[in-house]
Amino acid sequence: MKLGKRPRRLRKNKNIRNLIKETNLNISDMIYPLFVVNGENIYREIPAMPEVYQMSIDNILKEVEELIGLGIKGIILFGIPEYKDEIGSCAWQNDGVVQKTVRKIKNKYPDFLVITDLCLCQYTSHGHCGLVEDGDIRNDLTLDKLSKIAISHANAGVDMVAPSDMMDGRVEKIRNDLDKNGYKNVAIMSYSAKYHSGFYGPFRNAAHSAPEEGDRSTYQMDSANKNEALKEIKLDINEGADIVMVKPALSYLDIINEVKNNYKIPLAAYNVSGEYAMVKAASKKGWLDEKRVALEILTSIKRAGAEIIISYWAKDSAKWLKYGEK
Ligand code: PBG
């Protein structure tokens, strides 16, 4: 055997392996999703997402305190409104559940990063991410509503809004309207390449946001497409997105990598509910080691090129990375 052809030399023990580790997960890379509901003292586990809870505002505040203690730097917040209607009007109320929560968190923990998901689907009676007229999604009418939601979140003190609706032109509209209203410092993390995916199943059950009729294939992307993702990313960068996102993550690592190689902009990936649920289910049966597999998945997302990972495992990861072996 020739000299230098023994890669196993660098796998000899843990210290050497750690020294040459190319990808290190950090808790500061991760964002934890939270679901807020109206009411008090609510802490309701989501059926297909074990250990993920819908919480009322009082419990969200306790949760945030715990997250800060664990070293988690930020959350993305989803609201479950009191009622739904055709146009999703609960989404932009000043005293809506998300707006109230943001105000309270920022009041108590001004440095803690709060991102809000910006969409209509949890708020509309038909469950679509856009307004529906005569059976069609009305793109441009939806933009006005999204902008109203963004302004109401900004007014509550949010650091960053994350539009997840996949309407055309929404980043530009939101950026312009935030600026016009004096919210130049509110950032936009755009769900730029959001695929039409079966992996959102458990989330829809958590957020009560499944469409009543039809599906989201006229606005979310076909999972077969890669060039289209690059086009969507480019459009969002041109429209003023500060951070772009690929979603889901696990079946789209090639997309994450392609975006990383083509654009020099902070890149987020959303490790979605279905990716979490399938590991949870298998580990409950004793078929997979949850910690090991979760860390492997999260590392692969980072290795593919995402700097920011949104994950239901963020909280567990904080504990695993702190106390566990690297
Ligand atoms: C809302 C939204 C969804 C997710 C995030 N924002 C659901 C969807 O588009 O149907 C999915 C998150 C997850 O599955 O964890 N538009």
Image (tube, helix red, strand yellow):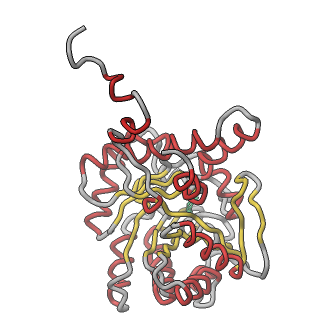
User: Which image quarter has ligand 1?
Assistant: bottom right
- Residue at the image position 48 percent from the left and 86 percent from the top: 157
When asked about the image quadrant of residue 136, the answer is bottom right
Residue closer to the observer: 85 or 44: 44
Residue 98 is left or right of residue 246, and the answer is right
Q: Is residue 35 above or below residue 308?
A: below
Residue 317 image point, x, y percent: 55, 54
Q: Is residue 23 left or right of residue 195?
A: left
Closer-to-camera residue (87/256): 256
For the point 28% across and 60% down, the residue is: 265
- Please state if 227 lies on the left or on the right of 193 as rendered: left
Position in image of residue 307 (x %, y %)? 37, 56
Q: Residue furthest left?
A: 3
| Quadrant where the image shows the N terminus | top left
Quick one: 92 or 155, which is closer to the camera?
155
Residue pictured at 37% horizontal, 70% vertical: 171
Q: Position of residue 20 (x, y in %)?
A: 32, 38
Give the vertical position of 115 relative to 9 (above or below).
below
Q: Is residue 85 visible?
A: no
Q: Position of residue 42 (x, y in %)?
A: 78, 74
Q: Is residue 278 visible?
A: yes
The residue depicted at 62 percent of the width and 71 percent of the height is 66
